[in-house]
Structures are given as C-alpha cells and as structure tokens.
Image: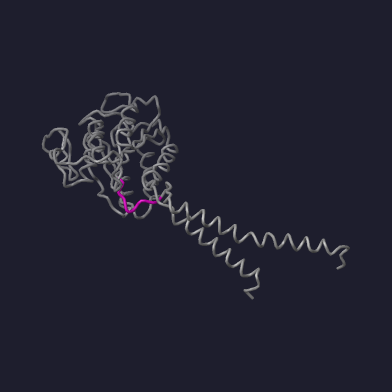
C-alpha cells in the first residue's frame, strides 16, 4: 500500500502507541481506587435463603369456612392453596399444621416430609367457634416446648387441657424478651375467614409471640361482605375482622394479606413463601472490590508485557 505522506503513518502509529502506553497505568489507578474503597469495608443488604427453618400453618377450621362465596367453599379453596404453598417450599423447610376452631390442635408436628403436612391439611374437620388467640398460643408452645406458655382455656400441642394461668408465661420474670421479628428459626402463618369468638385475645397472644421475636403473617380470607350461612338450625353472617389481623401482624413485624378468592389466596402464599424463607442480611462486600482490583492489575500486567514484546 502506498502513502502520500509518511507523516500520516507516524501519526497513526503515535495514536496507537499513546493509548497502549496509558491504558495499563489507568487500570492500575482504578485498581488502587478500588483497594481504597475495600479498606473502608463497605457493606450491602443482600437477600439470602435462610438456613433450615420451621413454618407453622394455622388453619381456620370453623364452620364459617363452609361459606360458598369462594368456590367450591372457603375450606376447600384454602386447603388447595395451602397444599400448593407447602409443595412449593424448599426441601429444608419444616412444616407444621395447627387446626383451630373453638380449640386448637397440632395435627402435624413440624416435619421435612411435606407430603405429611399436605395430608394433614387435607384432613381438616369443621369445628364450632374461632379461637385465633388460642391457635397462636399452641403454635408458641410448639416452638418453645420448654416454656410454660399457658392461658385460660388453651389446649397444648398434645390436645390436653392446660391449667388456668395468667396471660403472661409462668416464667415471665426469667424470660428475656427478644426484639420483635428477631427470631429467624421459625415463622407463623395464620389464615382465618372470621373473627375471634372464643379463648384468649389474639392481641394478647401476639404480644407473647412478639416477646419471643416470632413473626406472624396473617391472611384474611373471604369476600369483604361475608356471607350468611346456616348451622344447626341457625343462620349467621360470617365476616372478617381485618383490623385485628393487621394488628397481630404489625405487633410481631409480620405482614397482613387479604385474599377474596382462591387465586388471590394462592398469590398471597406466593409472596409469603419468599418473605418467610428468604432473609435480608447486611454483608461486607470488601472482597468484591479487592477481587476486581486484583483482576485489573492482572490485565494491566499482561497487556504491558504483551505490547512491550516480552510475551511471545
């Protein structure tokens, strides 16, 4: 190829030599800056899967769950959504099931065998009344079997009646209160379609959970207007007490969900799945800055040796 001026060739070569000369030092400078940042030990909030965890499902089995404002009825729709929720959980999550109406019973001890939990959900039987507070107490007794957590009219996880006791645990003076939401080994998911009609107050029971750092995620199920159902010759309107469910969730740093249909309930459980099995954790990321800096130094070294002709 012929050039009209050798000066053009020199200029072109000069420009190529110039950026080759300055690129390695520039990479080194960036690497030094990253090392300075790493020395400051920066951190970031990352979302990580929790280690082995327990989820207690508190399933409302009161007769109001016969209402057909959600097809085929509230009970069947809630069972289907709960079964899907359990099947979608990671294999390292233990699942326990508590069925409650006028009384609460642990019908499935926390287990890694999700098929057993699904079978327990499918076997729910209707009960009179709705004891939301009692269900929470039974859940806490399951999570903390060494603590005497007892309130008037509450059943234990063995189905036996507990002796009457104050709303506070008997060992309250020696129990160190945890920060609300700080207990990471387990969470409670409570579903109901109504309001508390028997047993201890849900708010009092939620306070016991908050004192132990246990989060309660509440799910209100059924249409906003409720439905009139017949039971033993009587007719009654079943409606949802959303405010109490919100208060229980807020007190324990959980979250309240409303679902007016089976599909909305499944969507709520999908969100819940991530909330209860994933955790936000502040993690030091200095290693990332140091690693990038090391990579830049290596690249700068290779380029410098290559362009100087020291690498064949």
| Position of residue 276 measured from the top left corner of the image (x, y, whole percent) | 36, 45
Give whichever of 209, 284 is nearer the camera: 284
The chosen color scheme is: one colour
Quarter of the figure with residue 128: top left
Which of 156/75 is in front? Answer: 156
Q: Please tell me whether residue 185 is drawn above or below residue 71 in the rendered image.
A: below
Which quadrant holds residue 160? top left
Q: Closer to the camera, 34 or 210?
A: 34
Above or below — where is 305 with respect to 182? below
Q: Position of residue 53 (x, y in %)?
A: 31, 50
Is the residue 60 above or below the residue 32 in the image? above
Query: Residue most toward the left?
Result: 163
The furthest residue to the bottom: 312
Residue 216 covered by magenta stretch = no
Q: Is residue 54 magenta?
A: yes
Left of 244 or right of it: where is 77? Answer: right
Name the residue located 47 percent from the left edge and 58 percent from the top edge. Answer: 290
Residue at the spot 43% in from the left edge and 50% down from the top edge: 40
Q: Position of residue 92 (x, y in %)?
A: 34, 55
Where is the N terminus found, in terms of image quarters?
bottom right
Q: Which residues are magenta?
A: 48-55
At x 23% / y 46%, what residue is drawn?
A: 143
* Magenta residues, dominant SS class: strand
Task: Tell whether 6 sits left or right of 165.
Answer: right
User: Does residue 276 sit above or below 102 in this rendering?
Assistant: below
Q: Nearer the viewer, residue 105 or 110?
A: 110
Looking at the picture, how far across and down is residue 244, in whole percent?
Answer: 31, 28
* Residue 145 in the figure: left or right of residue 267: left
């Amino acid at each position: 190829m012929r050039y009209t001026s050798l000066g053009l060739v020199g200029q072109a070569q000069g420009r190529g030599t110039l950026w080759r000369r300055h690129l390695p030092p520039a990479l080194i400078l960036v690497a030094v800056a990253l090392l300075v940042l790493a020395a400051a030990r920066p951190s970031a909030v990352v979302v990580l899967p929790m280690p082995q965890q327990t989820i207690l499902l508190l399933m409302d089995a009161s007769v109001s769950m016969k209402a057909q404002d959600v097809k085929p009825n509230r009970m069947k729709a809630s069972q289907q959504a709960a079964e899907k929720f359990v099947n979608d959980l990671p294999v390292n999550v233990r699942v326990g099931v508590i069925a409650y109406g006028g009384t609460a019973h642990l019908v499935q001890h926390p287990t890694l065998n999700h098929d057993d939990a699904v079978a327990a959900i499918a076997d729910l039987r209707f009960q009179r009344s709705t004891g939301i507070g009692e269900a929470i107490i039974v859940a806490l007794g399951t999570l903390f079997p060494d603590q005497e957590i007892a309130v008037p009219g509450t059943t234990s996880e063995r189905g036996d009646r507990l002796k009457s006791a104050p709303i506070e645990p008997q060992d309250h003076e020696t129990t160190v209160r945890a920060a609300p939401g700080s207990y990471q080994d387990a969470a409670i998911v409570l579903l109901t379609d109504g309001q508390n009609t028997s047993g201890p107050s849900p708010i009092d029971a939620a306070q016991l959970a908050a004192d132990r750092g246990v989060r309660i995620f509440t799910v209100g199920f059924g249409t906003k207007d409720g439905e009139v159902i017949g039971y033993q010759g009587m007719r009654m309107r079943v409606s949802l007490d959303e405010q109490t469910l919100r208060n229980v969730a807020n007190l324990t740093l959980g979250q309240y969900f409303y679902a007016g249909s089976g599909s909305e309930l499944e969507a709520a459980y999908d969100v819940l799945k991530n909330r209860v099995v994933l955790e936000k954790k502040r993690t030091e990321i200095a290693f990332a800055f140091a690693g990038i800096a090391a990579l830049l130094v290596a690249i700068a070294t290779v380029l410098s040796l290559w362009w100087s002709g020291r690498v064949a």
